[in-house]
């Protein structure tokens, strides 16, 4: 399968958000809080768009295309991220507001849980993989490895570590094949059925 990987274009932020929503449609944490079907269709893409708006200025949100079609997205925060841009913060806050309007109570617990994860990040400068998602029909076709390779190569060349969390046991072996090692199980989300497993490379 031919995959072209490059930086996500600004005009692709909206479709990338929808792609991540489809890729994480069975996420046991996010869907625990944003679980109503009709509201979920609005809130889930808005949740991911908020993340992309915040991370895009750091310059390491990648897109994978197959025959011109967006099939994968990976959002990394580099070890030395730039100061947040006002316009992007406004855009991110608007998307978070949409999530909060859809799920006034549950969204507070969801966002609080993600904020609490930050205290468990490695103390040394590192690459943080916020989210990586592949269009469901294209999963298990090498897209995930291809879209992660640019930053993994940079990290290897510079001696920097890479860190991530995943709620999906089915992805453990995938990250281990890429050289990641299992670290800790964490669950800072109140009432969530499960937490995440952290990986470090």
Image (spheres, rainbow, N blue to C red):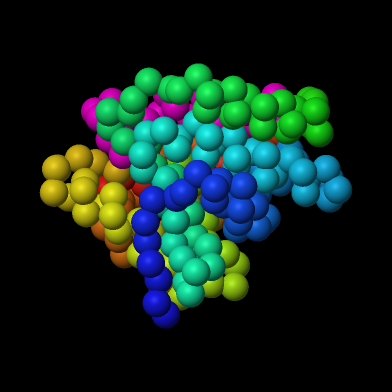
The one nearer the camera, 198 or 140, is 140
Q: Position of residue 59 (x, y in %)?
A: 36, 39
Q: Which residues are magenta?
A: 106-129
Q: Position of residue 189 (x, y in %)?
A: 62, 32
Q: Position of residue 69 (x, y in %)?
A: 53, 68
Residue drawn at point x = 65 percent, y = 57 percent: 22
Residue drawn at point x = 37 percent, y = 20 percent: 83
Which of the 4 image quarters holds residue 49?
Answer: top right
Residue drawn at point x = 53 percent, y = 34 percent: 53
Q: Inspect the magenta stretch and tell me whether residue 127 lies in it.
A: yes
Pick out the residue farthest to the front.
11
Q: Position of residue 68 (x, y in %)?
A: 50, 69
The answer to whether residue 150 is left or right of residue 74 is left
- Picture quarter with the N terminus: bottom left
The one nearer the camera, 6 or 122, is 6
Relative to 147, say whether 129 is above or below.
above
Residue drawn at point x = 59 percent, y = 22 percent: 90
Q: Inspect the magenta stretch and tell me whether residue 128 lies in it.
A: yes
Give the overall secondary structure of the magenta segment.
helix
Q: Is residue 137 visible?
A: yes
């Amino acid at each position: 399968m031919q995959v072209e990987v490059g930086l996500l274009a600004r005009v692709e932020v909206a479709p990338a958000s929808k792609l991540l929503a489809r890729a994480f449609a069975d996420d046991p944490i996010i869907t625990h809080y944003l679980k109503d079907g009709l509201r979920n269709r609005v809130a889930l893409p808005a949740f991911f768009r908020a993340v992309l708006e915040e991370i895009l200025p750091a310059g390491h949100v990648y897109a994978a295309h197959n025959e011109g079609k967006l099939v994968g997205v990976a959002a990394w925060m580099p070890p030395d991220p730039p100061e947040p841009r006002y316009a992007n913060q406004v855009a991110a806050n608007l998307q978070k507001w949409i999530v909060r309007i859809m799920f006034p109570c549950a969204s507070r617990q969801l966002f609080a849980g993600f904020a609490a994860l930050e205290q468990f990040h490695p103390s040394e400068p590192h690459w943080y993989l916020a989210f990586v998602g592949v269009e469901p029909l294209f999963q298990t076709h090498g897209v995930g490895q291809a879209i992660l390779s640019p930053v993994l190569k940079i990290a290897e060349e510079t001696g920097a570590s890479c860190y991530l969390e995943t709620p999906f046991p089915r992805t453990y072996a995938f990250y281990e094949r890429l050289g990641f090692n299992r670290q800790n199980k964490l669950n800072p989300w109140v009432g969530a059925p499960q937490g995440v497993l952290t990986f470090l490379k």
